[in-house]
Image: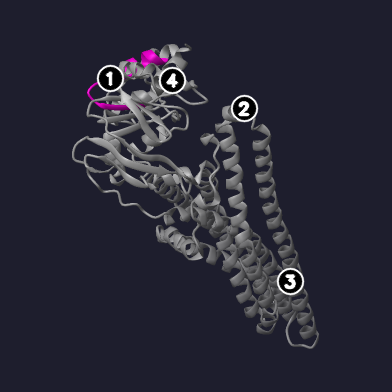
Amino acid sequence: MSTMATAPAQDRLPVAGPAEVRRAVGRLLAADPGRASAVLLLYFFAAAFSVSVPILLGKVVDGIGAGWSGERVNLVCAVILACVCVQFVLSRLGRLSGYRFGERAAARLRESVVERVLALPLVQVERAGRGDLGTRTASDVNVVADMLRDNGPTVATLVIEVVVLYVATFVASPLLGLVALVTVPPLYLAARRYLRRAAPAFLEQRAAMSEAAETVSASGAGARTVESLALQEERRALGYGRGQAMMDRMLRVVKLQTSFFTLLLMINRGQLVLVTLAAGIWYFQGGLTLGTAIAAITVTVRIANPTNGVMTQLGEFQQGAAALARIEGVNLVPAEPREARPEGADLRMDGVTFGYGDGPDVLHGLSLHPAPGERLVVVGPSGAGKSTIARLLAGIDRPRTGTATLGGVPVYDIGVEELRRRVVLVTQEHYVFTASLRDNLILAAPEAGDDRLEDALRRVDARWALDEGLDTVLGPEHRKLTTAEAQQIALARVVIADPDIVILDEATAGIDPASAGRVEASLAAALAGRTVIAIAHQLQAARSADRIAVVEDGRIAEAGTHDELLAAGRIYAGLWHAWQGD
């Protein structure tokens, strides 16, 4: 059932506040100030040349009424054409620079997100769940990247154009410029109200997307468990519920946007009506020329388009801000200083009590001391706490009470890189990258040569890999691996990594029983001289162990060799005979 567990809301990764989001945007801009400044300057001059067109057009209208010669009219029209051409070139250069800035900023963001996620404590990643972390590192990053690449430069253009257009209105006629400004306060209040209500709505929408993704992911990963326990209806109902919650939040966002854009349209139309009426009245009263009226009205008509564009993009910016808040939230996870350095390879647990989250204790005062170089197999009924022991020894979790130490220091306090050089945990879950077999193997030791890689494959009985070669490209669209083959790659990585201690948590569970024994024997030979702790349900691994520890109800119930425990006739003997089918 653990494979289907859905992380509670309180275990989700935190979400950054507005101040953190503003600082994040500042960092992205400060990382490439030259290009950001160039984008703004190009768009400013493009807007200036653009708004000069209606001003010059008004001059032409007044000039014709004043008796300009044909040559002078043609000259001004040529200037208008030149302004249009320059505006086109500057806009093109500004968009190109904006895309370059956005792509670089998005690349830096992706790199920083990967770096942050890799630095997270593994226990925090597990508690957050696949859906939450997956949407932050994929969907949220893509939304912010789109904002930086597309929406950001677009809004910069539109905002600059709006400002320049308002200035142009004052240049054409200060009185009409004041009339145009009458609609700015209601527009500001409407936008502020929309943003205040939309910000939490977008955050809730993206959180609902995470919950839905987590439910689908957990149900897929635990499909066999769902089927075996007849939980199909329960999981289906949960999935429908999460999907409906996501839809409800999306509809709330759509409702907010619809009401806001309707009000925006009314304000824009009201601005045009006011300016047109004022221009007409003052023209007939002789307060301004026809060309000035035409110029002011034309500029006002043009104000509506970039204003609408800015307000339309507010929705995208809210999406981007919500996504960036979730990305920046990863930074809010408290850092855990892990700088202890072990002296020696003595691994032990003494009086350990442990439970997950706020739940009950899983282990109760458990003590275990694998001898250096010993092959210790931990067996016991399902739910007895075997995998929990592996997690504590691997430094994933910290005991509630008692100690789990390596070389005299708490395992959980050892730096991750140092710990993984000494202790490697191999579970049933293995990840194979879409890359060559060689690239997948050298993750464990980048300096390893082909001979070392092939030797590791031989030791874990991966004959298929040796036959197809190290250049074989793995992945769903290339050489698709079975569960057993993926496990063999994981075991080969262990051999290549050459750690002091290896913890195998059902590491050969996906390999057929006929081959599992041979793989385990080969692996045992490859790891000779190292401390090996194997968590096992299938007891073929126990028979050849140096020592067997039997866990029941979170305690070590008995320990000894295979023959000693069979002779004792207690828990292990019962498990062995049941497994043999006696």
Q: State yes or no: discs 1 and 3 in contact (Cβ < 8 Å).
A: no
Residue placed under numbered mark 4 in the picture: 575
The percent position of residue 359, horizontal first and vertical second, equals: 48, 46
Name which residue type carries label 4.
Leu
Q: Nearer the viewer, residue 445 or 575?
A: 575
Q: Residue drawn at (60%, 61%), measured in percent from left and top?
A: 199
Q: Residue drawn at (78%, 75%), measured in percent from left and top?
A: 273
Residue placed under numbered mark 2 in the picture: 227
Residue placed under numbered mark 1 in the picture: 526
464 within the magenta span: no
Name which residue type carries label 2.
Glu
- How is the model colour-coded? one colour
> Quarter-wise, where is residue 151 in the image?
bottom right
**Residue 267 got which mark?**
3
Who comes first in sequence, dot 4 or dot 1? Answer: 1
Name which residue type carries label 1.
Ala
Choose mark 4 or mark 2, whichever is in front: 4
